[in-house]
Image: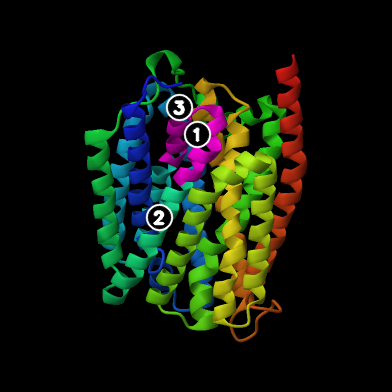
Amino acid sequence: MSTISGAGRQAAIAFILVTAVLDIIAMGIVIPVLPPLIEAFAGSSAQAGVINGMFIALWGLMQFVASPIIGSLSDQYGRRPVLLLSALGLAADYVLMALAPNLWWLALGRLIAGVTSASFTTVYAYMADITEPEHRARAYGLIGAAFSGGFVLGPLLGGFLGEISPRAPFWVAGAMSGIAFLYGWLILPESLPADRRMPFAWSRANPFGAMRLLRSHHELVGLAVVNFLLYFAHHVFSAVFVLYAAYRYGWTAWEVGALLALVGVLDMLVQGALVGPVAKRYGDRATMVFGLFGGAVGLACMGFAPTSLAFVLAMLPNALWGLAMPTLQSLMTRRVSDSEQGQLQGANSAVASIAGVVSPLFFGWIYSLSVGDRPLMPTSGAAFLIAALVLLAAALMGWFVARQVLLRERAEAAE
């Protein structure tokens, strides 16, 4: 455990949660306006779906490359410098995108954002440093709730600012990231003691090297596949949601922002209030599987929703998805040592980033086949229906894999 204790630990947790809120506000602000800005450059909704998918894939590719490097750097030099540099880099990146004159500049901005956003792995490693293993599901739920809180305010503010100017949200996002940097520089303590640090090595820091940690623990491989499927399904929102909402229901940037804020409120309630009690009563395994199944039901309802009201109501079962990520993270962190937490989060992020590369391209392509004068898909909601099947597969696999993890833990405890 970290040398931070008592009031210092509470201050550290508070910083992590506040920083998470500020970072996600900054990212969420641009969500309602980035796809329409791409559409303005591209000329059509179908083409914008493909290009938006490519942009998200670029972001995911940089996450894939950078996340294990950043995770390993945080294992050697500590979590604090990584978190501060990331916030500063994001601030500069949003200014760049605010000034972007064409799609190429926006693409460059997404590349830079992919690198600077990779520090989310360090946020989870920081929390693992200062939290007992048996309390990590609740701790990760708090992080998820903080992310959700930022996601409530970000799209709502972005939708409002987007009605004023499509560039205004980028300027405000840059200011938010700058505030996160200043706040951390003044407040954040280091969580990783010098005697628990691991020297940086490229064999672990490259994305494939980082994933060797997953192969070194048999149970982690299956959980990593569940993680991949979870992120693959989730990218249906980043790839096509804003464009689909405008195409299918005619929603404006403000309406999209308001709905995304509702998603954030529901997710915040689930991760902040439900994860801890539910995981304590039913265990990480059952909680994770139930969350994945609920998300699959919600996505299926979205794909079939005949009206905007039905689509909004589908957010209720979909919110149960928030039970899955904290408990999945908790199951994985219990299988590695304290000195490997940063490497594990880097490996997890690399897996998520692979999903972040292939999933937006896939769903952007599916969306382009689902709309227009001669759609090749039977419904414009096809992307959501496919994502539901992916999440259902994750739930089934998670049920069997997590059982092996629990059996291994019981055998080790009995020895």
Q: For residue 138: magenta?
A: yes
Q: Nearer the N terminus, badge 3 or badge 1? A: 1
- Mark 1, Cα crowd under 10 Å, few <14 / some 14-19 / many 20+, is many
Any part of residue 264 in sight? yes
Instruction: Give the numbered dot on residue 129.
Output: 3
Q: With respect to residue 325, does 31 lie above or below?
A: below
Q: Are marks 3 and 1 in contact (CB under 8 Å)?
A: no
The stretch in magenta equals 119-143
User: Marks 2 and 3, Cα distance to the nearest angstrom?
Assistant: 23 Å
Residue 5 place in picture, x, y as percent: 37, 23
Q: For residue 210: magenta?
A: no
User: Marks 2 and 1, Cα distance to the nearest angstrom?
Assistant: 27 Å
Q: Residue at x 75, y 17 (%)?
A: 414
Judging depth in this view, the residue of 77 and 207 nearest the camera is 77
Quick check: 174 left or right of 127? left
Give the residue type that dot 3 points to: Asp
Instruction: Give the numbered dot on residue 149.
Output: 2
Give the residue type that dot 2 points to: Gly
Q: Residue at x 56, y 67 (%)?
A: 315
- Mark 3, Cα crowd under 10 Å, few <14 / some 14-19 / many 20+, is many
What residue is pinned by disc 1?
Answer: 68
Displayed quadrant of residue 390: bottom right
Residue 154 place in picture, x, y as percent: 36, 61
Quick check: 300 left or right of 15? right
Judging depth in this view, the residue of 6 and 143 nearest the camera is 6
Q: Residue at x 46, y 60 (%)?
A: 264
Judging depth in this view, the residue of 15 and 357 nearest the camera is 15
Quick check: 41 left or right of 373? left
